[in-house]
Image: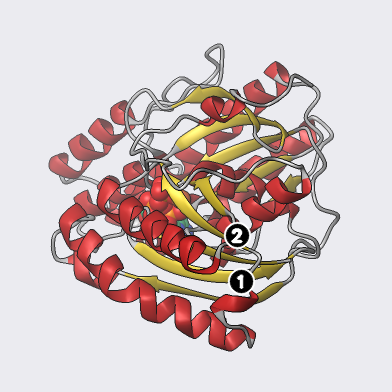
Amino acid sequence: VRVLGLEASCDETAAAVLDGQGRIMAEAVLSQEAEHARFGGVVPEIAARAHLAALPGLAARVLDKAGLGYGDLTAVAGTAGPGLIGGLIVGSGFAKGVAIARGIPFFAINHLEGHALTARIPGLLDQPPPAFPYLLLLLSGGHCQCVAVEGVGRYRRLGTTLDDAVGEAFDKAAKMLGLPWPGGPHLERLAAQGDASVVALPRPLLGRQGCDFSWSGLKTAVAQRVAKGDARAEDIAAGFQAAVAAVLADRAAHALAMFPAATAVVVAGGVAANGAVRAALARAAAARGVPMLAPPLRLCTDNAVMIAWAAVERLHAGLPADSLGHAPRPRWPLEELLSGLAPI
Ligand code: ATP
Ligand code: MG
Ligand code: FE
C-alpha cells in the first residue's frame, strides 16, 4: 500500500506518502503564513491561489523524495472539508485528478478525522498508540472541540466552543499585546517572563456542566486590562495563558467524566504546542488515570501525513473509497461520517 495524501484546507499546502503500516515515506508542508501575516489572518482568496500554485510541484517533490512515481500509488487522499472552500477544491480536485489518471481509489478525508487519528500512526509516540475509544481535544486556530473517538469513522462531539476557537483567542490576545500574527507562540514566550498571579482574569465556564468552551469574556477582560494600562504586558500574557490552561483542564476533566470509557486523552492542533496547556491537560488526564498523548508538534498542526493516514485507516477498516463526484464541504461535522457505517 502506498497512499498519497494532500492537504490544502486552510493556510498550509501539504503532501505526504505513507505505506500500509503508516511509515512516512516522505512529507512536506509549505506554510503561507508570510503571505497572510500583513493582513493579520488568513485571506481565503490568497490562500486558494497559493495552494493552486504550490500543490503540483509539492506533490511531485514528495513523490520524488519517496522514490515513487504516480504509477506506484495504490490510493490518493485529499482533504475535502471542513475548511476554506477554495483550498478544499484545489486539494481534493488535485487528488481526484490523480485518481482518474491512474485508475486508483480516491478518499475524501475529513480534516478533523485526520487530526483525530494521527496519534495512532505506529511508532509516532514514545508510548503505545491509543486504542479506541479515546478522547480527542482539538485545539487549533479554527477548532476547539472535545470529541469521543470510538473507531475509524465513529466520532461524537461532546463539546465545542460557543464563540472563538482557543487558538483564535490566543491570537487575539496576542494582538492586543502588540505581538505579530499568529500570536500564540509569541504570547507563550512573553508569558514566560511574566507572573500569572499579578493579573487576575476570568476563567469562562470553569466548573460548568458539560465540556463546551467560551473565550469571549476572557478576551474582553484582556482588552480592558490592556486599555487600563496599569499592568505589564508579560503579566497579562501569563495571566491569560494560566486562565486558558485552567479552563482547558477543567473542560477535559468534564469530558472524561462524560466519556468514562476513554483510554487516553489525545491533544491535537497548534495550541497543543503550548507548554502550560500541555502540563494542565496532563494533570487532568492523570487525575482520571489515563495518559495524555500528543503527536509531535509538526503533526499536531496542519499536515498531509494525517490525511494519508486517515485513508490507510479507512482501507484497513474496510471502508469504501469515495466517489469522484464527492463535493468538498466547508462545513462537515465529524458525526456525519457515521452515516453509511454499520452499527457497532
Ligand atoms: P485548523 O483550525 O484548520 O486546524 P489552523 O491553521 O488554524 O488550522 P493550527 O495550524 O493547528 O490551526 O494551529 C494554529 C494555532 O495554534 C494558532 O492560533 C496559533 O496561535 C496557535 N499556537 C501555535 N503555537 C502556540 C503556542 N505555543 N501557544 C499557544 N497557541 C499556539
Ligand atoms: Mg495553520
Ligand atoms: Fe487543522
Determine the image quadrant of residue 261. top right
The residue carrying mark 2 is 308
Front position in the image: 68 or 257: 68
Relative to 273, 340 lies left or right: right
Residue 40 lies, in percent from the top left, at 18, 57
Q: Quadrant of the C terminus?
A: top right
Residue found 67% across the figure and 26% down from its top: 341
Name the kind of residue labelled 1 in the image.
Answer: Val
Q: Quadrant of the N terminus?
A: bottom right
Task: Mark yes or no: residue 340 visible.
Answer: yes
Front position in the image: 306 or 292: 306
Residue found 86% across the figure and 54% down from its top: 128
Residue 120 lies, in percent from the top left, at 74, 52
Ligand 3 near label 1 (Cβ, under 8 Å)?
no
Question: Which of marks 1 and 2 precedes in the sequence?
Answer: 1
Front position in the image: 300 or 114: 114
Ligand 1 falls in quadrant: bottom left
The residue carrying mark 1 is 17
Relative to 298, 160 lies left or right: left
Circle 2: is it few (<14), some (14-19), or many (20+) Cα within 10 Å?
many
Dots 2, 1 in contact, CB < 8 A: yes
Front position in the image: 66 or 239: 66
Which coloring applies here? secondary structure
Name the kind of residue labelled 2 in the image.
Answer: Ala
Residue found 48% across the figure and 42% down from its top: 242
Residue 175 lies, in percent from the top left, at 22, 53
Circle 1: is it few (<14), some (14-19), or many (20+) Cα within 10 Å?
many
